[in-house]
Amino acid sequence: EDQVTQSPEALRLQEGESSSLNCSYTVSGLRGLFWYRQDPGKGPEFLFTLYSAGEEKEKERLKATLTKKESFLHITAPKPEDSATYLCAVQAGTGFQKLVFGTGTRLLVSP
Amino acid sequence: DAEITQSPRHKITETGRQVTLACHQTWNHNNMFWYRQDLGHGLRLIHYSYGVQDTNKGEVSDGYSVSRSNTEDLPLTLESAASSQTSVYFCASSESAGFGTDTQYFGPGTRLTVL
């Protein structure tokens, strides 16, 4: 069974304090790994898609990396507006576009 | 701008009633999905559709149904609402026909409470 585990569940940072969020996965044939940001009361907002081990993508203060077993979302010099829940999801196997989601990491960045 | 909308945004209903949640997208995407989000479970797939007249069950489909009569809409119906169906429901859509790897874009969600 495909599984996605995110850690930590919650993370509190001071503004400017860089850190990383982890997404470990067990899937049969990874087709894509997705990162989303979710603000309270809103739907998930797409950030990145990674397709193969060694791939990296960046957007502003965020950088996503992928290995054969896990993905990291690095946050460099975060600002309070980066506070949100970050969701990881994988698409695996064949047949259709099912996403399996982790439970997310709640990030709070204090001024 | 193209978008995906859900209505209502909040709904309170009673056990046993039929409830329909609306999802409308203006991207002309082929694929549409319904998820529910609960604490400790993350997002779980309820039903999905690859196009008009196509519907498929996801991992938590019991008690839910969908129908796809046009490209833009995928309404989700709870046939007889139960307290276990209290949740936040998200609709999503993606472009590719068939089995490609494609980004899913989410609506703002509907918070449903079943009393």
Image (cartoon, coloured by chain):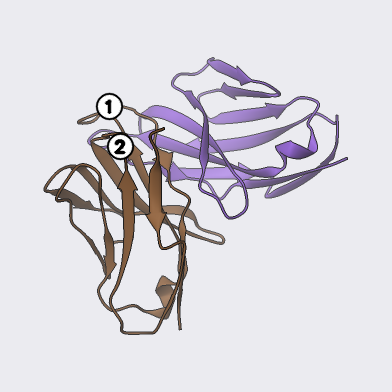
Chain colours: A purple, B brown
Q: Is residue A2 visible?
A: no
Instruction: Judge whether B111 appears above or below A95 on screen.
Output: below
Residue beneath disc 1: B100
Quadrant location of the C terminus of chain B?
A: bottom left
Q: Which residue is more in the foreground, B112 or A89?
A: B112
The secondary structure type at the circle numbered 2 is loop
Left or right, residue A10 beside residue B16: right
Residue beneath disc 2: A97
Left or right, residue A13 beside residue B48: right
Instruction: Judge whether B38 appears above or below A53 on screen.
Output: below
- Gap in angstroms between the C-alphas marked 2 and 1: 7 Å
Residue B60: percent from left, percent from top: 33, 61
Label 1: how many residues lie within 10 Å, few (<14), some (14-19) or many (20+)? some
Q: Residue at x 11, y 48 (%)?
A: B53
Residues at circles 2 and 1 in contact by the CB criterion of under 8 Å = yes
Q: In this figure, what is the number of numbered marks? A: 2
